[in-house]
Structures are given as structure tokens and as C-alpha cells.
């Protein structure tokens, strides 16, 4: 069966569609309409329907152009039912045509005047209760298929009966009830079955066949059911005539027409038959309780009438379902709130607002409580009921926050003071502190490696000692209180330590309901040096490396003494002191240097493009500089402070009295025995230190400078962090090449670039910002 043949069935089932449409009028589409004198689609032979509607698509009785096209654009495939039983599937065809038409003719949702009024009053759109049920439903009906036939189904013209008789007589037939209500059964004759209920069919047929035959069994079922035509009138979204399945009910037809319109009632929907009222259906009962008891099966010619909407109210605020609700009869505030799903959990009952229109003349506002009297008030048409949430204010609580063990709200009582809330200093020890104290990390307790050699510091457990200190500000805490006079915030400062230690003193302030007490720590505001603890890490060649708490003004020499003094292997000259504040400043300086280098490199690139002279050499140089910038960006400054300790210093007394800061890290390495040579040399390596050996000798050990080396800008990075260059070494101090490197020093030979090179000009400043290993890595990034 091809798509064209399927469309003939669909067109036949869609003949009644031309009577549908908004307002009950016939559909009008772009295209041609059959001229006067032409037959109507209903009067045409079955085979001529497709060609007629293709020629005159806007003739009443023909579906919209393209409405029957499938979404895939492919032909329908024949089903087993189509092949085995020609004519079977009429109801399915009707469903497909109705659904196809629905896709082409979605109804336009119109908003009522009361909806616009409620939106203006509420400041936001309010949904109409129940309308969402029909918003996404098709505008025409898809008939029921493959569902059990109810026992009280009334058989009528167009229904198909499948009759099977076996025994002494064999009869197997499909019989369709004709217009007279009769069926023809082979060897039995004509039987009148119209008006019988489905449960009565078997008994009726058994008696009729029994008058002619004996000793047989019989089975009868309903096959293809008839379609019936009903009318949906009044304030429906899509009023008109609908061809629906004979199994359809009032609710099915409501979905078919898209439900009540914006001005249609949802509570008084009528089903009329033969001029009599069969049932009145309330959609609210269906939606709220699933009550379908007033639903009724449709019969041919039934009229579903949707009257205009009744009285309406708008409910908004702290209810579970804000919206517009239709009233039915006398409706109290309590029943209206039940329609809205009840009060929300945060709804207040002391004050609700009722906006009312009186006698279609003026608007008034009323205010009342949701007590017994308020809940029994009767609502009227046009009322707007606003439910306010309760205030978030706590009537009998104070709030404790900041650096405290358990921040939160606590019950207030008359005469309550600060010490009642914070009874002791220990009560302010936070849970985080105890969690850190109780944490046992896997592995060793930490190890201290030489930061100058580029190794990482794995000291989390020891560093956590300093981090665990809460450092509460005992001299200052504050009470935040609302001034009831001008509703401004007052701040009442007090000495926290005295309030706890001296409960009878004046610092133990009396609290009021609603007060907020804030306890500050060092992380909230910086304390004076003598008010907070400072911790310094000491590692390397000391007798007791570890983390030490230092007093304000304590010096480097004193903390080394706390660490047990120096070992016999200590190399004081190469001591490395890393400082947090210096590292932060150096990070910013390095960022500025990299930005300047990038800017200069961009300018050089533009100049190279404008000039074709030596373009290849310029490109190689710029590529090398770009690699250097990328290499520098990966390194982080250490914040090293150059201490300028004497080269031969060996005792604690020779350590400078340099004041320490919180977070300082001191590493005293063992005596080194090598001098490094890196950069543009033939053999980068570390060479054995020899006393009084000249810088040039170490360069010669490395094979000397390469042809690409810039020998005028050779640098010597001392083990203590100091940088010595050919330019900084004055002539009266002797030749730069004859300088004697010290153990741990590094000789750096940069590459030579043509023309002005910003990197070489900025090299001393960058060197001071990086560790020796990081700077060496950056230089090596320049070497081809």
C-alpha cells in the first residue's frame, strides 16, 4: 500500500474537518476553492477525493494543504493489518489525519481582561489554573485504539462484529452494523443488534443461532468501531464539529478542542443530548482529586457546551500554586486557598491583603488575619488575595559568627551577656583546628630540601602548625545592633578577653534579642606584631631544624641559636632566607619585566616586517627571545633575601641581626664543592672548586665561549644570591676574568643578539627575582 492510497483513507476521514475552526467557522486557507456548482467533497466518489482536494485545497471538507504530509517525507509502509484485512485501520487513519492537522493549526492562546488586570496588580503574569493541561494538547482528537471495549458500550451503525461459530456448524465472519442497525450472518440471516450493549451480544447471538442449529460454540468480539460526530460549542478554544471514536468521553472531547478558551468556564462544562442535560463536568475536581465520576461516554450528535467563565479571583504570594481561580458558588478564603494548594511553609497568617472591586465602580483594599473569621470570609468576582511571607527576623535569638567554634543562632533570654554566649577562651577553638590536629598524613612527617637547588619543600605537617593558630583578636570584638529609632545599625565594641575573664566587668556587655556578635581573627584584620604569633622555618646545617615561634623583633641569629646552633658542615655564606613579602613583590616585578620584554619583542617584529634586511637572522633572534619569555613565565620567584654574610663565616655570631617576619624560611646548606658554568659554552657542567682559581679558567674548562656567546655580558651569580657582571665590576677592582668564583657560584654566558636587546638590559633585575636554578633554566632556554 503506497502513501497515495493511505492519503485516500485519511481524506475520507477528514471530510468533517471543514466544519471545524475558531468560532465554528469553516477553515479558510491560501489557494483555490471549488467554484459554485461543483460537488462537495462529501458527495464525491471515494477515488476522486484526493485529486479534487489537490485541485481545490480551500474547499470546505478538504484538510489544509500539506496537513497530511508525514514529517519524514517518505511513503507509509503497509502494515500487517492493511495487507491481511483491507479496510481495517480507519480509526488509525483518522487519528493520523487529526494529528497532522493539529500540527498545522495550533490555536492562538488569548488572554482575558482579568488576566491582564491581575498581572498589572501582581507585577507578574499569573497562570490560569487548569489551562496548562490543554496548552500542549492537539487541537483535534486522536481516537482511542486497541483498548478494551467497556461492557456497557452500546452497539450502533458502523461498528464491526467478529463472529466465530464452530461445532456442527462452522461460521467465521466479520459483519458491520448497517444504518438500520442490522448485521447479515451467513446461514443465519439478518439480526438487529443496534442498541445492544457489548456484554449482551454473545447471549443474543447464541439464542439467534440456537433457533437454527444445535451443538455449537460461539464467540463474538467487537472489531473496528464506528466514528461519531459531536459538537463542541460555546467558549471553547476550538469550537466546531468533531469526528471522534465511539469510545470517546466528554474529557476526550475537551482535549480534542483544546479546552475552554480564555473566557470559558472550567467548572460548569455541560454535555447535552437530545435537548436534555446529561452531566455537568467540573475540571477542578478532575485536576485536584482525579475525580472523573461526572465524565460520560459520547453518543452521535452530542453537544458539549462550555459556558462563559464565572467569577474569578487571583491568589498570589506565599501559596503553593499562585494563579487565577474560577469560583463556583459561595467560596470562602479557606476553600480558595485549598484550590491554590494551601499556604506555603513560609506564609504569614497575621496579615493578608484583599483587593476588591466594588459594584464595578471602585477598588478598595482590606487587610485581615487568617484566623477563623478571616478564613470564612467570602470572596467575590475580581478579588485579588495576597499572602505575605513571615519576617525572617528571629524574636528571641542572638547570632554568633566569625572565628568561633560553632557559629549560628542561640536562644536569647532576659539579662543575657557576652560571657553567657562565650563562657571561656577554649570555647572559641574551632573545629578546623581540632581536625588539623587530629589529621595524620601518610608517610613521613615532612622533609626539608634545598630550595636553592630547585627542589620542592615537602613540609605540610610542620607548616600546618602555624596555619592552625587561630590568633583571635582578644582586644576587639563587636556587637551589631539595630537601632529601633532610625533603623540604623549600631556597633558596640568591647574587649573580648576581658568580657570572658572578668564576667563582672563592664566589657561583659548585656545582649538584646537580634544582636549579632562577631569575633575577629588575624585573617579578618591584621594584628600588631606583639599581638600575633610568628613562625619561622629553619632547616639545613643546624643541630635542631624545625618550625620555631619567634617574638616580635627576634633576629635571624637568635632563631639559629634556638635551632641548636650550626653544625660543622654549615656553609653560612650560601645561606638562603626566603621571605613571603619579598616573594610577592618579586612576582609583581617579574610580571612587569615579562610584559616589557613582550612589548619590545612585538616592536622588533613589526620593524623586521617593515625592513627586509637580514630577515632570517631577525626571525631566529625573535624566536629565541620568545622562547626565553615563555621559559621565564614558568618560574616562580623565591623571595630570597641577600644576607651578605662573610665568605669565610663559620659561627653564629657572624650571622647578621636581621629581623625576622612571619613565614620566613632559612636554609643553611652544607659546604659546596663545585662551580657551575652554563649558557653559550661548549660544555655546560659543574666543575670542582679550586681556591683562587680565576673565572676565565672555569670558562676554559667548559671549552670556552661559543661563537654565538656575548662575552661582554657574562654574569657571575654568587652562592649568596648576589650578581656580579662585567659592567658592575669596576676596573680598579681588577679584571672581571680574574675574579675567583666561590663554592656554589654559577658562571652564566648569555647568547649574543644583533642590535639592541631588551632582555640583556633587564637581565640583572630579573636575576635578583629568580632562584639560581630558575635563572639558569631561563638562560638555557635561549641557547640554540
Image (cartoon, rainbow, N blue to C red):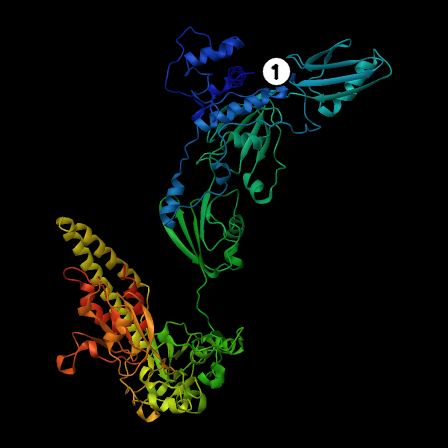
Q: 10 Å neighbourhood of mark 1: few (<14), some, or many (≥20)?
A: few
Label 1: which residue?
A: 87
Q: Is residue 687 above or below residue 297?
A: below
Q: Is residue 651 above or below residue 408?
A: below
Residue 686 x, y percent position in the rendering: 34, 73
Residue 207 x, y percent position in the rendering: 81, 17
Would residue 703 appear left or right of 183 to someone viewing this image? left
Outermost residue toward the right in this view: 215
Outermost residue toward the bottom in this view: 653
Q: Nearer the viewer, residue 670 or 256?
A: 670
The N terminus lies in which quarter of the figure? top right
The answer to whether any part of residue 771 appears in the image is no
Q: Nearer the viewer, residue 617 or 97?
A: 617
**How many labels, in total?**
1
Quarter of the image holding residue 54?
top left
Quarter of the image holding residue 403?
bottom left
Amino acid at each position: 500500500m503506497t502513501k497515495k492510497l493511505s492519503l485516500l483513507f485519511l481524506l475520507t476521514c477528514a471530510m468533517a474537518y471543514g466544519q471545524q475552526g475558531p468560532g465554528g467557522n469553516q477553515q479558510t486557507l491560501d489557494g483555490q476553492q471549488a467554484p459554485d456548482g461543483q460537488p462537495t467533497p462529501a458527495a464525491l466518489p471515494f477515488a476522486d477525493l484526493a485529486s479534487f482536494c489537490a485541485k481545490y485545497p480551500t474547499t470546505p471538507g478538504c484538510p489544509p494543504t500539506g496537513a497530511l504530509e508525514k514529517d519524514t517525507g517518505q511513503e507509509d509502509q503497509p502494515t500487517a493489518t492493511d495487507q491481511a484485512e483491507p479496510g481495517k485501520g480507519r480509526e488509525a487513519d483518522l487519528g493520523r489525519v487529526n494529528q497532522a492537522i493539529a500540527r498545522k493549526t495550533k490555536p492562538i492562546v488569548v488572554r482575558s481582561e482579568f488576566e491582564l488586570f491581575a498581572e498589572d496588580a501582581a507585577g507578574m503574569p499569573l497562570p490560569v489554573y487548569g489551562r496548562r493541561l490543554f496548552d500542549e494538547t492537539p487541537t483535534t482528537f486522536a481516537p482511542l485504539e486497541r483498548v478494551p471495549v467497556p461492557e456497557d458500550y452500546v452497539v450502533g451503525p458502523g461498528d464491526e462484529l467478529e463472529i466465530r461459530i464452530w461445532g456442527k456448524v462452522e461460521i467465521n465472519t466479520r459483519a458491520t452494523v448497517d444504518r438500520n442497525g442490522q448485521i447479515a450472518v451467513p446461514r443465519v440471516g439478518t439480526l438487529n443488534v443496534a442498541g445492544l450493549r457489548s456484554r449482551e451480544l454473545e447471549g443474543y447471538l447464541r439464542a439467534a443461532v440456537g433457533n437454527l442449529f444445535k451443538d455449537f460454540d460461539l464467540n463474538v468480539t467487537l472489531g473496528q468501531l464506528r466514528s461519531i460526530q459531536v459538537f463542541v460549542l460555546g467558549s471553547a478554544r476550538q469550537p466546531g464539529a468533531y469526528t471522534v471514536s465511539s469510545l470517546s468521553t466528554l474529557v476526550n472531547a475537551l482535549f480534542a478542542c483544546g479546552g475552554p478558551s480564555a473566557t470559558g468556564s472550567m467548572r460548569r462544562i455541560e454535555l447535552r443530548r437530545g435537548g436534555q442535560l446529561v452531566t455537568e463536568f467540573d475540571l477542578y475536581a478532575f485536576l485536584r482529586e482525579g475525580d472523573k465520576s461526572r465524565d460520560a461516554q459520547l453518543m452521535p450528535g452530542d453537544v458539549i457546551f462550555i459556558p462563559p467563565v464565572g467569577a474569578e479571583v487571583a491568589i498570589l504570594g506565599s501559596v503553593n500554586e499562585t494563579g487565577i481561580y474560577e469560583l463556583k458558588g459561595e467560596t470562602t478564603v479557606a476553600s480558595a486557598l485549598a484550590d491554590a494548594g494551601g499556604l506555603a511553609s513560609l506564609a504569614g497568617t497575621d496579615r493578608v491583603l484583599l483587593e476588591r472591586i466594588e459594584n464595578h465602580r471602585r477598588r478598595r483594599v482590606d487587610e485581615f488575619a487568617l484566623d477563623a473569621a478571616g478564613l470564612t470570609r467570602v470572596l467575590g468576582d475580581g478579588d485579588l488575595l495576597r499572602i505575605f511571607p513571615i519576617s525572617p527576623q528571629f524574636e528571641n535569638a542572638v547570632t554568633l559568627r566569625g572565628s568561633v567554634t560553632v557559629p549560628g543562632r542561640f536562644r536569647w533570654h532576659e539579662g543575657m551577656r557576652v560571657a553567657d554566649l562565650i563562657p571561656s577562651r577554649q570555647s572559641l577553638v574551632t573545629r578546623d583546628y581540632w581536625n588539623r590536629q587530629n589529621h595524620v598524613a601518610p608517610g613521613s612527617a615532612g622533609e626539608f630540601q634545598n630550595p636553592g637547588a630547585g627542589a620542592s619543600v615537602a613540609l605540610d605537617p610542620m607548616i600546618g602548625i602555624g596555619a592552625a593558630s587561630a590568633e583571635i583578636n582578644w582586644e576587639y570584638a563587636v556587637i551589631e545592633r539595630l537601632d529601633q529609632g532610625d533603623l540604623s545599625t549600631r556597633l558596640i565594641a568591647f574587649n573580648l578577653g576581658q568580657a570572658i575573664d572578668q564576667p563582672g566587668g563592664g566589657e561583659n556587655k548585656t545582649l538584646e534579642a537580634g544582636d549579632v556578635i562577631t569575633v575577629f581573627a588575624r585573617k579578618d584584620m591584621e594584628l600588631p606584631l606583639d599581638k600575633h604569633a610568628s613562625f619561622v622555618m629553619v632547616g639545613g646545617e643546624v643541630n635542631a631544624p624545625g618550625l620555631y615561634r619567634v617574638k616580635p623583633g627576634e633576629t635571624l641569629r637568635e632563631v639559629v641559636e634556638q635551632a641548636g646552633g650550626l653544625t660543622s658542615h654549615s656553609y653560612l655564606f650560601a645561606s638562603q632566607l626566603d621571605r613571603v613579602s619579598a616573594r610577592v613583590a618579586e612576582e609583581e616585578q617579574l610580571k612587569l619585566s615579562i610584559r616589557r620584554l613582550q612589548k619590545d619583542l612585538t616592536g622588533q617584529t613589526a620593524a623586521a616586517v617593515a625592513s627586509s634586511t637580514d630577515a632570517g637572522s631577525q626571525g631566529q633572534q625573535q624566536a629565541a627571545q620568545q622562547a626565553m619569555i615563555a621559559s621565564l613565565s614558568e618560574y616562580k620567584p623565591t623571595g630570597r633575601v641577600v644576607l651578605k654574610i662573610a665568605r669565610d663565616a663559620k659561627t653564629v655570631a657572624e650571622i647578621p641581626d636581621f629581623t625576622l617576619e612571619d613565614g620566613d624560611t632559612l636554609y643553611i646548606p652544607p659546604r659546596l664543592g663545585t662551580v657551575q658554568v652554563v649558557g653559550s659554552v661548549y660544555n655546560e657542567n659543574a666543575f670542582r672548586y679550586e681556591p683562587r682559581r680565576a673565572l676565565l679558567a672555569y670558562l676554559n674548562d667548559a671549552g670556552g665561549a661559543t661563537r654565538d656567546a656575548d662575552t661582554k655580558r657574562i654574569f657571575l651569580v654568587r652562592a649568596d644570591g648576589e650578581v656580579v657582571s662585567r659592567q658592575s665590576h669596576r676596573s680598579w677592582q681588577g679584571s672581571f676574568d680574574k675574579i675567583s668564583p666561590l663554592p656554589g657560584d654559577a658562571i652564566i654566558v648569555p647568547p649574543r643578539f644583533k642590535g639592541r636587546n631588551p632582555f640583556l638590559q633587564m637581565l640583572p633585575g630579573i636575576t635578583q627575582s629568580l632562584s639560581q636554578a630558575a635563572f639558569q633554566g631561563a638562560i638555557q632556554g635561549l641557547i640554540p
